[in-house]
Every structure is written in C-alpha cells, then in structure tokens.
Amino acid sequence: MSLQVKRVYASPHPEDGLRILVDRLWPRGLAKEAAALDEWLRECAPSDELRKWFAHDRAKWHEFKRRYFAELGSKEALLAPIRSMAKKKRVTLLFGASDTKCNNAVALREYLESRE
C-alpha cells in the first residue's frame, strides 16, 4: 500500500498521486485551487467531539488514536476505496495541522496500514 501524509499547505507535486484532504474543517487561509485536491473526505476525520477533546495536545496522542481508531471501525465502507486506490498508486492524505507527527492524517495512515 502506498500511503503518505503531507500538510495541505505544502506545494502539490505530481508524485503526490491522489490527493485526499482528511480534515473535517477546511484549512484556514487556503484557496481551494491552491489545495489541488482530488477529494475531500470529511467523514474520515475524527468527530467534532474527539477533535475538540484532543486539541493537538501531544500528551493525549495515544488516547486520541485509540478513540479515533474506534470511530474508524464503523467507517470501513468509506475507507475501502482509499485502500484500493493505495494498492494501485500513491495516495497522499492531506492535513492542515501544524504538528506533522501527531495529527489525524498520521493516525489514519497508521490505521489503514495496520488493517491491510
């Protein structure tokens, strides 16, 4: 499976492959054209309650992932096309957070790769 994560604010490149924004909210200050998205899958993002609880607090990272993975368990039908596409070509999961190591796109990639 060929999955990568990248900040949506970074310049798009042809090697990104399919570009999917996986945030619930549109990234601040970013024009839709500049994002160069193929898809925006809001439904793959953590619930509003979980997102607000986490608030990008690294101390909550492991518990965030546990709760987010539980939410993703009920979204397998939505995730199946991502898995299928990632087997054929590179898929880039895009996020808006400034933390590049502890965000929902990183967690989503881990979830998808662990359940191949």
Image (tube, rainbow, N blue to C red):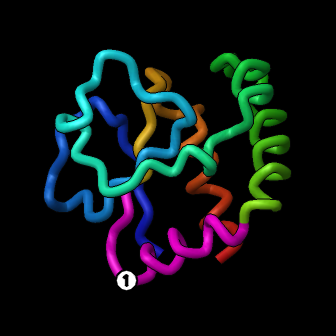
Disc 1 residue type (three-letter): Lys
Viewer-side residue, 106 vs 80? 80
Viewer-side residue, 70 vs 49? 49
- Residue 11, horizontal then vertical, whole percent: 17, 38
Residue 18 lies within the magenta run? no
Q: Residue at x 68, y 17 (%)?
A: 55
Residue 87 lies within the magenta run? yes
Relative horizontal placement of residue 43, taking residue 69 as reference (left or right): left
Dot 1: what SS?
helix
Relative horizontal placement of residue 67, taking residue 76 as reference (left or right): right
Q: Main secondary structure of the magenta part?
A: helix
10 Å neighbourhood of mark 1: few (<14), some, or many (≥20)?
Answer: few
- Residue 4, horizontal then vertical, whole percent: 41, 56
Q: In the displayed structure, would residue 39 be above or below residue 54?
A: below
- Residue 12, horizontal then vertical, whole percent: 19, 45
Q: In the displayed structure, would residue 53 be above or below residue 65?
A: above
Q: Which residue is mark 1?
A: 88
Q: Residue at x 59, y 32 (%)?
A: 102
Q: Residue at x 44, y 48 (%)?
A: 40
- Residue 13, horizontal then vertical, whole percent: 15, 51
Q: In the displayed structure, would residue 114 be above or below residue 69?
A: below
Tag count in the figure? 1
Quadrant in which the C terminus is drawn: bottom right
Relative horizontal placement of residue 70, taking residue 40 as reference (left or right): right
Q: In the displayed structure, would residue 58 be above or below residue 12?
A: above
Query: Magenta region: which residues?
Result: 76-92
Q: Quadrant of residue 115?
A: bottom right
Q: Quadrant of residue 95?
A: top left
Q: Residue at x 84, y 34 (%)?
A: 63
